[in-house]
Structures are given as C-alpha cells and as structure tokens.
Amino acid sequence: MEQAPEALKRKQIGRWIAIGVVTAAIVALAFAILQTDLHPRTDDASVRANYIEIAPEVSGRLVELPVKDNAFVKKGDLLFLIDPRPYEYALQQALSDQEALEQQIIDAKRRIAAQNSAAEAALAGVHSSRTGVKTAGSTIDVAKATVSRAQASLAAAEAQLKLATNNLHRIEPLLQKQYVTVEQIDQANTAVRVAQGNFDEAQAALVQSQAQLAQSILRQQEADSAAAESQAKLGQAIHTIDTVDTLMSERPGKAAKVDSARLDLERCRVVAPFNAYVNNMNISVGEYAHPGTPLFTLIDTRTWWVVANYRESKVKNIAIGSHVDVYLMGHPDRRFNGTVESIGYGVFPEDGAVTGGLPNIERTLNWVHLSTRFPVRVRVQDPDPDLFRIGATALTVVR
C-alpha cells in the first residue's frame, strides 16, 4: 500500500518532466523558427571571384614563361614573353620609313625654294621684256617721225633742185644773145649743183631714217618675242612649282605605323594586371601564341563574394547592406564578415518552356510545392586569399 502513492508520485513527476521537455522543445523550435526567419541562413552557397582569360594580342613563339599553374602573381609580374624580334624589326622599318618621309619633305622644300627663285627670275624677265617692248615702241615712233622729217626735207630739196634747174634752162639760151652774163650762168649752175647736193643728202637721210625705222620695227618684234618667251618661262616655272601637301599628308599615316609597331612590341611582354592566382595553365616555353586565343586564366584575388541561394520565403527578411556571417565548409572554424550587395530578381522558371509559340505546361500535380531559390550576392569584407577558392561551398547567416 505504501508503494502505490510513491509510484503515483513518480508517474506525476515523470509526466511533468515530459511536459516540460515537450514545452522546452516547442519553445526551442519556435525560437529556432523565429531566428531562422529573422536571420536567414543557407548552406546552398558558393564562393565566387572575378577571373579573366589571358590571351595574347600579338602572335609569336613564347620565349619566357616564368609563372606556374596555381601560382600567385603580383600586379606587374611578367606572365610570359613573346619573341620580340619580328616586332623590333617592324618598328625599325616604320621608323626608317618615317625618317625617309621627313628627308623627302626637306628635299621637296629645297626644290620648291629653287623653283620659286626660278619663277621670280622669270617674272623679272617678263618685266624687263615688257620694258623692252615699250622702249622699242618709243624708238619706232621716233624713227617714224625722223622718216617724216626726212621725206619733208627730200620734198623741199627736190623742189629747190627743180627750181634751180628750171632757172638754168631758162637763162642758158639768153647767153648767146648776151641778155645774161657768164657769171649769172655760173651762179645758176652752182645753184643747181647745191640743190642737187641738198636733194641727194635729203634722199640719203630718208633712206637712213627708213632703215632706222625698219630696224626699230625688228627690235620691237624681237622684244615681243622675248616678252612672249619670258612669259612662257614664267608660266612654266609657276607650273613646275611643287607643294609638300601630298608628302605632309603622309605624316599621320607614318606616325600611326610607328605607334602601331611600338604597341605591338610592347604587347610581346604580358604582365599581371592585378594580384591573382594562375589557373588552368597547360603550356610551356615554345608554344606558339595566337591573338585572342587564351593561354591560361587569372583569378582576381582583390574581390571575393559568395552567391547564396535563399528560398523566396526568406528573401523578404534580407536587405541590401545587411551584415552576413560567412563560413567556409573547408574551414568552419573561421568566420568572415560580408555585406549583402544585391539580390537576384529572376531565375529561369521550370514551367517556362515554349513550344510552337505557346506555353508548354506539363500535366502533373505536385502535392508539395518547393520554394524557388533566388541568388543573393554577398561581398566578403575580410577574405583570406589563401582559403578562398572559386566554387568552394559556403554557409551564410544574415544578421
């Protein structure tokens, strides 16, 4: 009888303990659910980083390859060197062509200066010839005036000679009848001879003035010919004057070729653009590089982030700028600080297929609907480059 109350008491104690355990479990579950809602977490996350494929911009054989696969390189470290000799020759050729063009420009300027001098001389010859033409014209005018005077003098001398001759013929028959004296006959003869002399002199002067006029006309013709020749020389000199515009227009092209050759030479030496890890290297010295063909990959170690896929029901509790605790599966004892950088706004829907222009909806009925997951981009503030690797699994908790 004494054992019954004790057993009953034990049952009551056990019942209360069970109730307390269930109550505590319910409270813990509610707290866990609340914490999960307030601080969403997921282990569906992976580490990401920027990476670039290193591809040469010029072709050639690799003569230096100091880096190794998975090695760490610093910004400015030599990644590889392409045989620079062909590009050095190309640069020398471009510089030689540029210098040859400059010498051509100098020679052209000298030739143009000589041609300008010839043109100036021809222009002076034109002026001189024109002056000669004017002088010859004046000489012709003077010669014509002289001819006119000589003709007038000849006419006067001819009239005087005719008068003296007529007087002599009139008085000669009178000598026999002694109407005139011998002295008068001698005077008349003298007058005829003087008039004849004056006539001959005037005729000679006329011939001389006519010759001078003909000579002046010939000189004018010569002056006209000289003027025409000088004008032709001037036109030829002006026509042959070259310009350096054509050569000057080639300067930008030659300079561009020099710059291009120098750039190609610089591109033979490829250095790391930032601190990075070398990845996916399967080449060695002697490989022939082709422009645009990747040789290996560089993983940028400056920026790391985690892409965490959260259920759509949890996204409402995540805000841009929220603090995030980040754990790596390979190092769960290390906690890293992160910040929500962005939240994805779209994923490809499972029922989004289109066939023949119409939506293709499968005829199935799912009793349990799985929540869609949206990617949340978390920027890691204090990454350890030695621990972070692209694709590593991570766990994130939004605080």
Image: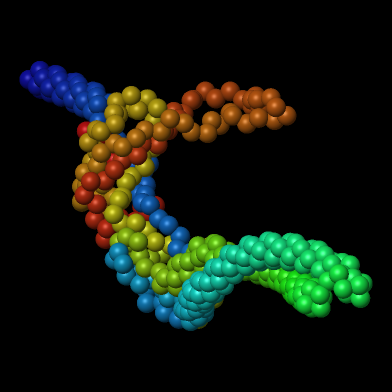
Q: In the picture shown, does residue 294 fall above or below 318?
A: below
Q: In the picture shown, does residue 313 fall above or below 205?
A: above
In the picture provided, is 66 more to the left or to the right than 212? left
Q: Say if residue 335 shows up in the picture.
A: yes
Q: In the picture shown, does residue 50 fall above or below 257?
A: above
- Residue 313, horizontal then vertical, whole percent: 37, 25
**Image quarter (top left, top right, bottom left or bottom right) of the N terminus:** top left
Q: In this orientation, which residue lies closer to the viewer: 11 or 388?
A: 388
- Residue 348, horizontal then vertical, whole percent: 52, 33
Q: In this orientation, which residue lies closer to the viewer: 277 or 372?
A: 277
Residue at 91% over, 76% down: 176
Residue 351: which quarter of the image?
top right
The number of discs equals 0
**Image quarter (top left, top right, bottom left or bottom right) of the C terminus:** top left
Residue 13: which quarter of the image?
top left
In the picture provided, is 210 more to the left or to the right than 91? right
Q: Say if residue 105 shows up in the picture.
A: no
- Residue 50, horizontal then vertical, whole percent: 38, 52
Q: In the picture shown, does residue 364 fall above or below 282?
A: above
Residue at 55% over, 62% down: 245
Q: Residue furthest front?
A: 178
Residue at 36% over, 51% down: 49
Residue at 78% over, 66% down: 160
In the picture provided, is 186 more to the left or to the right than 257? right
Q: Residue furthest left?
A: 2
Q: In this orientation, which residue lies closer to the viewer: 357 or 288?
A: 288
